[in-house]
Amino acid sequence: MALSRALYALPIVLPLAVMVRVLATMTVVPGPFIDDADHRGRYTLQNGTSVPILKGLYGVPGLDDAITQVAITFCQLIFHDDQRMWWQCVVFLTDYAGLTALWMLESLRTANRGTFFQTFAVPLFLAQFVTVGNIAPLYFYFFYIFSPLKKYSTASARLIDGAGVLAILPTLLVVYYVPHLISLFHPDFETRHLANWIWQLYPLWASILLFTLSSVIRPFLNDNAEAVQRRNKTGIHVIGGVMITLSAISYWYMLLFSPLSVSEALVPKYFIELPKDTPTSLTSIFQYDFITSFTSVLLWLAYHLGDLKSAGICQLSWPRILLSSVVIGGLGGPGVLVWVGWLTREELMTSTEHSKTN
């Protein structure tokens, strides 16, 4: 059963092959530039401005060395050194926050306790260093394999920790949005760079803060079963509403105000042929990271919808699902589409319990 499910779900992991190929080839051009900036301790913008870069912050040699390299790649974004990366990341990193919230919710689900999927910090921490496009396909592939529909057949299995639900938005505000926005808009470039260093470890800070806030909130919650389900449903819809709104705003902000076309901002132009310069190489890597990570998530959701259709729970036809996805994705972007898909999955899984009691 597990083997057949694993073979059936292989398309979820296919984006990984694309991302591996991209990193293996497109890091060749920016590699010397990044190493030189690391060696000199300064990042030089295309206009000649030179900014000191951090060589350490946490006192852990291997970790500091890794973040130094990653933070240099983000300098092109946070110093607004390339408008293509800036406009791409307006959408990508907003949608990435929504994906993080979804990851956090799944980690809080009763059915995932005692499994690798109980943690969101580990995969997201790794993604900060090897790209989410390398981690998401593997994570959601194995998530699907080990999450047959029967795993969620009861309300208690589907239940998401209520205190955690209430703690997600404050956690993301503090550990994701605040340092990220400082890194993009603070007038001092060195402060931007420092904020980006702090943001690079946001999965770790999020894990600590989510646990802390959840522990503080939990004693004040009503543990009546009906109250729990009602509160959780409201809380999850609020999170989804916030993430959908932010993703839609960032997407339309890019559409309305970017001097670039959508294809220039979001679609990489290189794959077989390699970019000739560092800015184009780094922008292409970010573009592929966005595409491969969200493709794997959407495939994961599609496979779950397929399970629900096979069980007779989802009555929507595939043409209607695909058409709706194209419309929603076109109007709101990938982040909106992922959240609409996930909320739809939640509603359909809830209906399985209702059908048993009718």
Image (cartoon, rainbow, N blue to C red):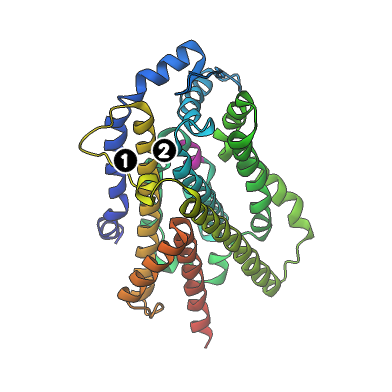
Front-most of residues 190 and 156: 190
Callout 2 crowding tier (Cα within 10 Å): few <14, some 14–19, many ≥20: many
Relative to 16, is 331 on the left or the right?
right
* Cβ–Cβ under 8 Å for marks 1 and 2: yes
Q: Is residue 115 visible?
A: no
Relative to 287, is 51 on the left or the right?
right
Q: Which residue is the extreme one toward the front?
A: 259
| Residue 297 occupies quadrant | bottom left
Name the amino acid, label 1: Met
Relative to 198, is 336 on the left or the right?
left
Spatial CA distance of label 1 from label 2 is: 9 Å
Secondary-structure class at tag 2: loop
The span shown in magenta is: 122-126
| Residue 5 occupies quadrant | bottom left
Relative to 11, is 340 on the left or the right?
right
Where residue 19 is drawn, which disc sits there? Answer: 1
Q: How many marks?
A: 2
